[in-house]
Image (tube, helix red, strand yellow):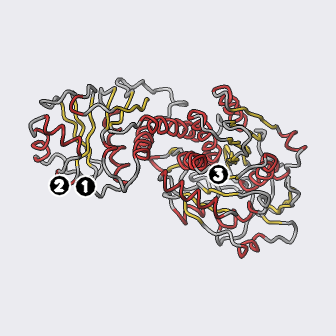
Amino acid sequence: MQYLATTTAPATLETDCIVVAVFEDGELSPSASTLNKQSDDNISRIIARGDITGKAGQTLLLQDVKGITSPRVLLVGCGEKGSTSENNYISATTAMATVLNSTAIRHATSCLAEIDVQSRPLTWKVRQTAISTEAVLYKYTQTKSDIKPQEFPLESISFYDESDATQAALSGQAISNGMTLARELGNLPGNICTPTYLAQQAVELANRFDSISTTILDEDEMANLGMGSLLSVSRGSREPAKLIVMNYNGAADARPVVLVGKGLTFDAGGISLKPSSGMDEMKYDMCGAASVFGTLAAIAELKLAINVIGVVPSSENMPDGDANKPGDVVTSMAGKTIEILNTDAEGRLILCDALTYSARFDPEVVIDIATLTGAIIVALGSQASGLMANNQPLADQLLQAGNDSYDRVWQLPIWDDYQQQLDSNFADIANIGGKEAGSVTAACFLSRFTKDFNWAHLDIAGTAWKGGKAKGATGRPVPLLVQFLLNHIASK
């Protein structure tokens, strides 16, 4: 797919399909009005028949409308005029992509970005169109044998606007490509996407982009660094753990932003075995890592002037005679001892050593991304990721980036009041803090390893994938992370 820009007026566009907005009560967007006049009010007469009311997400595909150059006009409902919300716009662009993907249309031009969406800039509307489109077009095929190529694949969408939308289109395409990579890694089954496989993908990413270099640490090297907490998780698995380090170098002599992504390629819970129902979804426990891969791919494609290091601790968490047992005590790279009260709270065990390791890069900020707790789903559902931080300006920047990208986060506290829940009689810290405030105490655990730098934690357990019939990775929070980095560059 390509996302392009055009300033050619809709009435003279030569394209397979022009997409225009219709509002409730039959009101037309500016481009729709232009086409309506060109067709001697033919479009308004068709709308008057009641086949489309303008409700967000409704569509009506018109063929060979008299007076219009394009052979097709797609009418898309966008809700009440002047009150189109972000959700209305996403519904409209998703519906548009669904229609375009199910026809013989190869090249389409969208005029939807001209409408007002809660005062969102053109950049947001173009990016969101690309994200919605890629979500519709994405189809997992890697482990299927009966997939047939689409007969009429959509090749490009151009955006019409009187201003130049080219850069916005390029950004939208790069972010969408990053999300697709994150989706693909997340959707792969655990017998394929192992820690070794993730390490191979990191090497391939470095081969693809000259701006990225990759280093892989094996278990012996991690042992020499004293990463007893991380390595304790992989003891129950036949798959060796990997510490993956990807270095994007886009700016000279600038302290890096470090992104730490939880890479549990499968989480059975260890000795604290998870219930069998839904356990297949634990292949998604590496979606934090997948988002780091996707973000690095996106910023490398955009050639952003920033330094970013992706650190991915990757392991499996399986039951075995050598696996962690409840009550075991392990020693982290930071020298802190940890009592493992629940082996299914393993994400924090691999992240704490990765966070300690990140200090060696003299980071400007460190952000970890992890499908860490089921408690965050109870608290925030699938709409927002959880945010906790030891630095409020950093938290504010992530909140702003979430709002800017519409890949939103909500901040929770990590007050000292909660730290006592992690007290242990037998170690410096326990790996769980009881049934209360599970997401907060998980972040409190990680905060013990982030004293030397500004740090934020994103709990994406509710946003990284969908369950049920729509089961699949979402590619979040790639839009949030890319927007954070774009804002970070703009603030310099």
Q: Is residue 245 visible?
A: yes
Q: Nearer the viewer, mark 3 or mark 1?
A: 1
Q: Of the residues shown, which amino acid type is indicated by label 2?
A: Asp
Spatial separation of the CA atoms under disc 1 and disc 2: 9 Å
Residue for badge 3: 369
Q: Residue lying farthest bottom? A: 417
Q: What x and y, as percent, mark residue 490?
A: 57, 48
Residue in the foreground of this view, choosing between 258 and 135: 258
Where residue 209 sits, quadrant-wise, is top right
4 lies above or below 473:
above
* Residue type marked 3: Ile
Q: Is residue 267 above or below residue 380?
A: above
Looking at the picture, how far across and down is residue 8, in whole percent? 29, 31
Q: Quadrant of residue 201?
A: top right
Earlier-in-chain disc, 3 versus 1: 1
To which residue does mark 1 refer?
81
Between label 3 and label 2, give the one nearer the viewer: 2
Q: Are marks 3 and 2 in contact (CB under 8 Å)?
A: no
Residue that label 2 marks? 25
Secondary structure at badge 1 equals loop
